[in-house]
Amino acid sequence: MKIGIFGGSFNPPHKMHKAIAHNLIKDHYVDKIIFVPTGIKYKYKSNLLNDKVRFNMLNLMCKNNKKLEVSDYELKNRVVYTYETLNYFKEKYKDDDIYFICGTDNLSYIDRWKNGLEILKNNKLLVIKRNGDDLKKILEKYKDYNDNIIITNIKENEISSTKIREMIYNNKEVDEYLEDRVYSYIKKNRLYIMNEKTTIYKSRLK
């Protein structure tokens, strides 16, 4: 079996995340995808909702789809690096092929990640093209690892979690970007509401 590891903050998970997963499976790049939300200890994201909330939203998005799973592997009280995650899943699924899913934006600076070149050397990457990224330049940069870099025929559109959060802050409808179950969960729990006194994004769930 070919298994894709799809990491991210998923803050919140939206229809484009699911569409990427669906298309990777439909086009036979992988047979199954495991979403791996980043833990709240991740230092480059200061406005993450807590782990439980994002994990719950991902499970709602993947509900009733046997080819989509959610893992809590990175939801620890420390930063978990991508190379650790990939090593974990390769050990867990020894008889399967593991692929790391990432966009060209992340690929462009993966050499600056913790053990980034190790990731390129020891893993197969399924790369999603993003508008504006210079793919030729990126592949030239990593020419020694191009055998492990698979450029998919899938492109991201302009949907982003950042845009969705901003729309919610401004009381705009975002139902076209979110699965119904996810949007209901966000409204029910009043997620992504700005606390004007502290300017910290808050959730009533702990």
Image: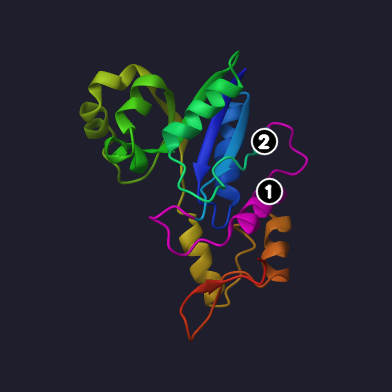
Label 2 close to label 1 by CB (< 8 Å): yes
Taking the image as drawn, is residue 193 in sight? yes
Q: Residues within 10 Å of mark 2 (few under 14, many from 20)?
A: many
* Colour scheme employed for the rendering of this structure: rainbow
Any mark on residue 68, and which?
Answer: 2
Above or below 180: residue 169? below
| Left or right of 29, for residue 153 | left
Residue positioned 55% across, 39% down in the render: 20
Spot the residue most to the top.
95
Among the 4 quarters of the image, the one containing residue 205 = bottom right
Q: Which x, y percent locates residue 37? A: 55, 46
Q: Which x, y percent locates residue 35? A: 59, 40
In magenta stretch: residue 53 = yes
Q: Of the residues shown, which amino acid type is indicated by label 2?
A: Leu
Tell me which segment is drawn in magenta. 41-67
Q: Which x, y percent locates residue 81? A: 43, 40
Give the Cα distance between marks 2 and 1: 9 Å
In magenta stretch: residue 152 = no
Q: Secondary structure at mark 2?
A: strand
Q: Nearer the viewer, residue 89 or 102?
A: 89
Q: Secondary structure at mark 1?
A: helix
